[in-house]
Amino acid sequence: NQWEKIFVPIKKCIMIEQVKRAIQQIEKLPESKQIEIAKLIQDELSWDATILQSQDQLASLAKEALKEYKEGKTSDKSW
């Protein structure tokens, strides 16, 4: 699609600018805060990768849970 060739690169440029601005703000913070933010970002990226890698397993577990629910094999919990 010709519009994707135009807008996708523009969207990527905007995101890159947002990241650059965020990094500039982070650079002004004390080192301890920078480390904290870096760990949060790394944790988030790691979590995203884990979720992407486990999509088939999650889908299988969801199907199994739905089947058990439909068969009346589940119960309400108050937690």
Image: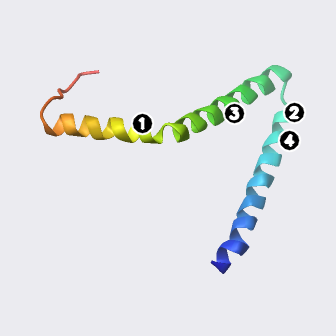
Q: CA distance from mark 1 to mark 4?
A: 39 Å
10 Å crowding of disc 1: few (<14), some (14-19), many (20+)? few
The residue indicated by pointer 1 is: 57
Q: Which mark is residue 28?
A: 2
10 Å crowding of disc 4: few (<14), some (14-19), many (20+)? few
The residue indicated by pointer 3 is: 41
Question: Residue at left 19%, top 27%?
Answer: 76
10 Å crowding of disc 3: few (<14), some (14-19), many (20+)? few
Q: Amino acid at mark 1?
A: Gln
In-image side of 63 versus 10 (left or right): left
Q: Amino acid at mark 4?
A: Gln
Residue 2 higher or lower than 46, as above or below: below
Residue 60 higher or lower than 74, as above or below: below
C-beta proximity under 8 Å, tags 4 and 2: yes
Q: Which mark is residue 16?
A: none
Quarter occupied by residue 50? top right
Whichever of labels 1 and 3 marks the residue nearer the N terminus, that label is 3
The residue indicated by pointer 4 is: 24
Q: Nearer the viewer, mark 2 or mark 1?
A: 1
Quarter occupied by residue 3? bottom right
User: In terms of secondary structure, where does tag 4 sit?
Assistant: helix
Whichever of labels 1 and 4 marks the residue nearer the N terminus, that label is 4
User: In terms of secondary structure, where does tag 2 sit?
Assistant: loop
Q: Position of residue 25 (x, y in %)?
A: 82, 39
